[in-house]
Image (tube, rainbow, N blue to C red):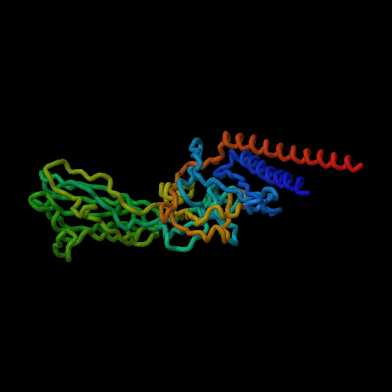
Amino acid sequence: MASFSIPLSGLNADSTALNTIANNLANMSTTAYKSQTTNFSDLFYQQIGTSGSGNEIQVGAGVQVASNQTDFTQGSYNTSGMTSNDVALDGNGFFVVSDGSSNLYTRDGSFTQDASGNLVTSSGLKVMGYPAVNGVVNTNAPLTAINIPVIGQVQQPQATTSFNMTANLDCTSDMNTGFPASVGIFDSLGVSHAATITYTQMGNNTWSYSAALPATDFTSGVSTPVTGTMTFDSGGNLISVTPTGGTATTVGTGTGDISSIPLSFTGLSDGAADLNISWNLLGSTGAPTITQEDSESVAPAAPANGYAAGVYQSFTIGSDGTVTATYSNGQTQAVGRLALANVTNPQGLSLQGNGDYATTLASGAASIGPSGSGGLGTIQDSALEESNVNISAEFSNLIIAQRAFEANSKAVTTFDTVTQETINMIH
């Protein structure tokens, strides 16, 4: 009988709405959870006749659940006590994760590291991103699982290949009096050495230089310095360098000019490879960094590349999604960059649980890129996105759904009473 089936369809639909509301309330504290709303639509209609004016007389068959719509609006951030491993999305998109066979998508950025060093979600899915080679991220490469060094893993040392020195040489210095400046460098085994650059005034606007390591650093016990002469103009600017036994060459960036002095040290006592280092003479603006003025000779600590071996300590995720490992030698190195994805129709995504989504024909294929590109959102580091459940709205919806359920229940009992009265009439 339609009198029973119609309110029964309402009870079924209201039950779904109550379940949706209950699920929203249960997930109020779930990271990046997106609330849902149950939408209804009427069922088909049966024509039982026409009116005198020819209008169809139609009777409805009840109600059905038309959709469960997900609210993908931004949740607020929780930054209190969050670790540097946590990230939140600001704007459109999802983090890309993998179960080993296919990619899934999530807004939950509470990542951690598994025993193999992979960056994983709380449910163990691998976080996908762009790989890094020698600390350089390649956003044109295919996605791969982001792998981070594990505790105890050693970063290999890197020999020094260049250094920059900023110095001023006092033009009023006594002739033939040396002014030493120190540079810390590393060899291929990660052993540190103290190179000394000694400047000596030889005449007006002319200084000699001598770059050497301590004699004890060599197997022979003898240090062979790299020497030459520097010439300055009347304004105190370095204009040319003459290596011992060589010819004067203009300092600059033009054709035939030099911008650095090559230093070479062989036969190190620790068995390391020969050191070949460029002593850079120009700064970032292209101007020489060594000057001659009537001022005290100074040479602040010269920055050099290279480093000793280091043990992995921790990792961080930056605001652009770059995952960076930190070592005990003070070095940091990028090991990858998080990838983000978005779809044309987020409502078509299939909910997989654990905050994960899968693409469907309705959602369309995922478009993937780095944060901030192609309409994708940006990353908030050291934060997590909270659920967007509105408790006030949910309690209001709960009351409405409860009243609707009660009304349909009342309709069933009313029709039951009418049916019973009809049966009694027969008897």
- Give the side of residue 46 with respect to residue 181, left or right: right
- Residue 327 appears in the figure: no
Relative to 218, residue 170 above or below: above
State the image coordinates of residue 221 (x, y, percent, origin top left). Answer: 32, 56
State the image coordinates of residue 379 (x, y, percent, origin top left). Answer: 45, 47
- Residue 38 appears in the figure: yes
Counting the numbered discs, the total is: 0
Relative to 269, residue 89 above or below: above
- Give the side of residue 50 with respect to residue 212, left or right: right
Q: Residue at horizontal 54%, vertical 41%? A: 388
Q: Nearer the viewer, residue 353 or 124?
A: 353
Instruction: Report the residue that reaches farthest toward the right.
Output: 427
Q: Nearer the viewer, residue 225 or 94?
A: 94
State the image coordinates of residue 198 (x, y, percent, origin top left). Answer: 21, 50
State the image coordinates of residue 353 (x, y, percent, origin top left). Answer: 62, 50
Q: Residue at horizontal 32%, vertical 49%? A: 184
| Residue 210 location, quadrant | bottom left
Q: Residue at horizontal 23%, vertical 51%? A: 197
Instruction: Report the residue that reaches farthest toward the front.
Output: 52
Q: Quadrant of the C terminus?
A: top right
Q: Nearer the viewer, residue 58 or 241?
A: 58
Relative to 80, residue 154 above or below: below
Q: Residue at horizontal 16%, vertical 58%? A: 251
- Give the side of residue 335 with respect to residue 121, left or right: left
